[in-house]
């Protein structure tokens, strides 16, 4: 009987883990006693946010947003399960009195249950404000308020209320799991060369662990913030066995380590993995060396600066449900593509076709993508990652419509998005070169350009990159210049204006692309593909229930909605 109980317990734990809702990746207790728990997720592209509020009560529950943390001006929903069934209303408060029911109901109830002394209310609303009584949800910390009663008689809540400030759209959890510690991988007293751009690489052996650990948090350790532009950590293949240090991309040894495991960009902060996933290290994934790459941007060519920058990794022996990984996507970094000068809005593309992943992996699977870091250099203005399935665009995986070179951070997607095998991902970058008089080439320098998206996902695969590059032979043929030398001369001497820029951009998009996929051991598949058309996905309209001018008609509308939903 004891064995059976243990088996059932293990099954229940596995089942509860399996029930993690990818649409509600974030969670916080709003009160010190942990009687009020809020889970949420969002889709900034669709313009919606989803909440699930769990309160230890069999009475009414209330939740809302407040300008100053009190009732005045608050945007509130109240709901519960009473003797007559479920009730749920969108309200606003003018002061310390009963919140007034909004004439426009802009919260959508998805489910409302009461069981074992707990009330669980799941609802959705638009991120923007839809009427004068709603508060918009912004990228800044907001004051969340809650209250509840022990019965369904909505009266004064006494002390059963509170306020907590959270940044819902830029949320970064901070957990302290048991059996946790940290280690650093950094440069050690490295003298930065007096060059405008310099990439330094250091291959290191990480700490040894007998059992697998999960890294749950990564923090930048920056000693010269005016020089360090970005950091990357790559896992090396088994063929790399000895530590090594040199200028990046000047030695075969540094070129072999190409599987991204961590990334940080200027202006970014710490990054924490979701509760269901961690970056594996040690145990069966031990024995690998790692390459730390630091991009130094030294426009003043300062000499004698000593740097110890790198990354700090917090880890725990309490393993999470999934191993996480990072997949590099976008336009392969190569000097063979050029961006014309005097362009107001020039587009480049990088294609990842996951249908070819089985060519390098024996047991591939879908990707559950939860975060992304988008990356260009100084000319970048926008980055979009389109998601295609069955030849049609189904989503924008990640978007930055106002890209800022000085602020590059890992963004939470708001919910976990599934990329199925066979899907295509298209990274589109928009550049402005109006203030440049010569071609901008793809490359490593800050004055060169890149178009990349690093996707954080689980479960991990031994996959390092899925990128593309224009077929240069096809490009030269389309432009009537089969010789690389003549093509280069043409590109250099062309008078670039709106017409010539547009013609070149359309040619780049129209020709075939070389699609490259590499695994952790540098096995590579090469195929061809075409760039699909990418559209801006329209935001969902304001979530709306009942718009009426009288309380009686509003109550009638709510009653009709209730009947349609539950009967």
Image (cartoon, rainbow, N blue to C red):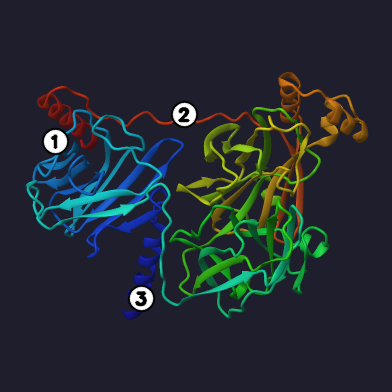
Asked if residue 185 is positioned above or below residue 372 in the image, the reply reads: below
Q: CA distance from mark 3 to mark 2?
A: 50 Å
Mark linked to residue 388? none
Disc 3 designates what residue? 6
Labels 2 and 1 touching (C-beta < 8 A): no
- Pick the quarter of the image with the C terminus: top left
Disc 1 designates what residue? 100
Assign a secondary structure to mark 3: helix
Q: Earlier in the sequence, mark 3 or mark 1?
A: 3
Mark 3 vs mark 2, foreground winner is 2
Assign a secondary structure to mark 1: strand
Q: Earlier in the sequence, mark 2 or mark 1?
A: 1
Relative horizontal placement of residue 70, taking residue 460 as reference (left or right): left
Residue 248: x percent and y percent?
77, 60
Q: CA distance from mark 3 to mark 1?
A: 51 Å
- Pick the quarter of the image with the N terminus: bottom left
Asked if residue 458 is positioned above or below residue 308 in the image, the reply reads: above
User: Is residue 369 visible in the rendered structure shown here?
Assistant: no
């Amino acid at each position: 009987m004891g064995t059976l109980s243990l088996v059932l317990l293990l099954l229940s734990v596995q089942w509860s883990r399996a029930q993690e809702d990818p649409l509600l990746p974030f969670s916080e207790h709003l009160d010190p006693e942990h009687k009020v728990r809020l889970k949420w997720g969002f889709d900034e592209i669709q313009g919606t946010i989803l909440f699930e509020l769990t309160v230890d009560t069999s009475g009414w529950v209330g939740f809302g947003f407040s300008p100053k943390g009190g009732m005045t001006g608050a945007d509130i929903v109240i709901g519960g399960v009473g003797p007559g069934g479920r009730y749920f209303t969108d309200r606003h408060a003018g002061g310390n009195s009963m919140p007034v029911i909004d004439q426009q109901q802009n919260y959508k109830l998805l489910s409302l249950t009461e069981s074992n002394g707990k009330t669980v209310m799941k609802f959705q609303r638009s991120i923007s404000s839809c009427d004068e009584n709603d508060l918009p949800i912004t990228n800044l910390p907001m004051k969340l308020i809650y209250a509840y009663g022990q019965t369904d008689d909505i009266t004064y809540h006494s002390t059963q209320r509170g306020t907590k400030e959270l940044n819902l759209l830029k949320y970064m959890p901070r957990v302290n799991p048991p059996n946790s510690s940290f280690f650093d991988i950094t440069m050690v007293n490295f003298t930065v060369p007096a060059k405008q751009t310099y990439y330094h690489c250091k291959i290191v052996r990480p700490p040894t662990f007998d059992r697998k650990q999960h890294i749950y948090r990564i923090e930048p350790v920056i000693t010269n913030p005016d020089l360090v532009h970005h950091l990357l950590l790559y896992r090396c293949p088994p063929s790399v066995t000895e530590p090594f240090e040199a200028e990046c991309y000047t030695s075969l040894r540094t070129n072999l380590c190409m599987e991204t495991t961590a990334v940080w960009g200027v202006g970014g902060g710490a990054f924490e993995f979701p509760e269901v996933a961690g970056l594996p290290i040690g145990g069966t994934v031990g024995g690998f060396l790692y390459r730390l790459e630091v991009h130094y941007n030294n426009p003043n060519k300062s000499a004698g600066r000593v740097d110890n920058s790198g990354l700090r990794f917090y880890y725990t022996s309490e393993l999470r449900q999934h191993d996480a990984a990072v997949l590099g996507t976008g336009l392969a970094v190569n000097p063979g593509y050029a961006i014309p000068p005097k362009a107001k809005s020039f587009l480049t593309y990088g294609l990842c076709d996951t249908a070819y992943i089985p060519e390098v992996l024996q047991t591939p699977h879908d990707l559950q993508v939860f975060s992304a870091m988008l990356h260009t250099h100084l000319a970048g203005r926008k980055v979009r990652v389109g998601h295609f399935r069955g030849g049609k665009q189904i989503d924008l995986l990640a978007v930055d419509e106002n890209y800022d070179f000085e602020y590059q951070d890992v963004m939470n997607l708001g919910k976990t998005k599934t990329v199925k095998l066979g899907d295509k991902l298209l990274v589109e970058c928009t550049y402005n070169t109006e203030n440049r008089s010569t071609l901008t080439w793809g490359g490593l320098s800050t004055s060169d350009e890149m178009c990349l998206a690093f996707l954080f996902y689980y479960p991990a695969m031994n996959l390092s990159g899925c990128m593309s590059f224009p077929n240069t032979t096809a490009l030269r043929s389309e432009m009537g210049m089969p010789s690389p030398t003549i093509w280069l001369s043409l590109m250099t001497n062309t008078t670039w204006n709106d017409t010539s820029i547009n013609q070149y951009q359309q040619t780049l998009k129209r020709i075939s692309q070389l699609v490259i996929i590499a695994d952790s051991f540098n096995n590579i598949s090469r195929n061809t593909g075409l760039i699909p058309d990418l559209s801006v996905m329209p935001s969902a309209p304001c979530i709306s229930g009942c718009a009426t001018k009288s309380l009686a008609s509003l109550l009638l509308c709510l009653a009709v909605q209730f009947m349609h939903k539950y009967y």
